[in-house]
Amino acid sequence: VQLQASGGGLVQPGGSLRLSCVASGSTFDTYAIGWFRQAPGKERDGVSCISSSTGDGTIYYADSVKGRFTISRSNAKNTAYLQMNNLKPDDTAVYYCATVGFCRKYGSEGFGSWGQGTLVTVSS
């Protein structure tokens, strides 16, 4: 499966963005999906993940985004979303989506295909 992330941009602190991750192929619903981000000079970190449609329904959020970000998926559209509200300058990063083996309570486990990143800049 190939993934393509989009929806990044420049937003002021407190603003919102919705990232999309579109997948090719007909088996999207069998994949757990993870969102990750990499800020300048830092390692790539897990932000959120959502189980596959055949999984146990687990959704994970990093502590830094809990209550502000919401992950969802539309299997009919082969798309996963990351709704980001109340954005902060610390959220500035390149955001990536990926298929993952499992979405666990502690984060993503196992990695498959990666999409290209989309840049989110939070600045006044």
Image: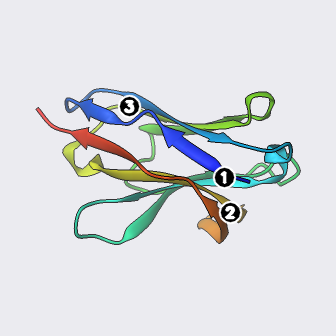
Q: Is residue 57 left or right of residue 37?
A: right
Q: Which numbered disc, 2 or 3, marks the residue that appears first in the sequence?
A: 3
| Residue 91 horizontal side relative to residue 97, left or right | left
Crowding at label 1, few (<14), some or many (≥20) Cα neighbours within 10 Å?
Answer: many
Which label is found at residue 100? 2
In this view, 26 is above or below 74: below
Three-letter residue code for mark 3 = Asn
Measured in 3D between alpha carbons, the distance from the residue under mark 2 to the one under mark 1, in whole angstroms, is 6 Å
The C terminus is located in which quarter? top left
The correct choice, above or below, for 119 with respect to 62 in the image is above
Quadrant in which the N terminus appears:
bottom right
Of residues 59 and 6, the one nearer the viewer is 6
Q: Quadrant of residue 78?
A: top right
Does residue 58 appear in the picture of this structure? yes
- Residue shown at the point (22%, 39%) measured from the top left: 122
| Whole-number angstrom distance, CA of label 2 to CA of label 3 | 24 Å
Answer yes or no: do the residues labelled 2 and 3 have beta carbons within 8 Å? no
Task: Identify the residue shown where x is 62% and y is 48%.
Answer: 3
- The amino acid at mark 2 is Val
State yes or no: discs 2 and 1 in contact (Cβ < 8 Å). Answer: yes
Three-letter amino acid code at disc 1? Ile
Q: Which residue is drawn at 48% across and 37% down?
A: 6
Residue 52: image x %, image y %? 79, 50
The picture places residue 116, in percent across and down from the top left corner, at: 49, 52
Q: Which of the labelled discs sits on residue 85, or is there none?
A: 3
Name which residue lies at 44% across and 51% down.
Answer: 117
Q: Which mark is residue 33?
A: 1
Judge left or right: residue 54 versus residue 57.
Answer: right
Question: Disc 2 on helix, strand or loop?
Answer: strand
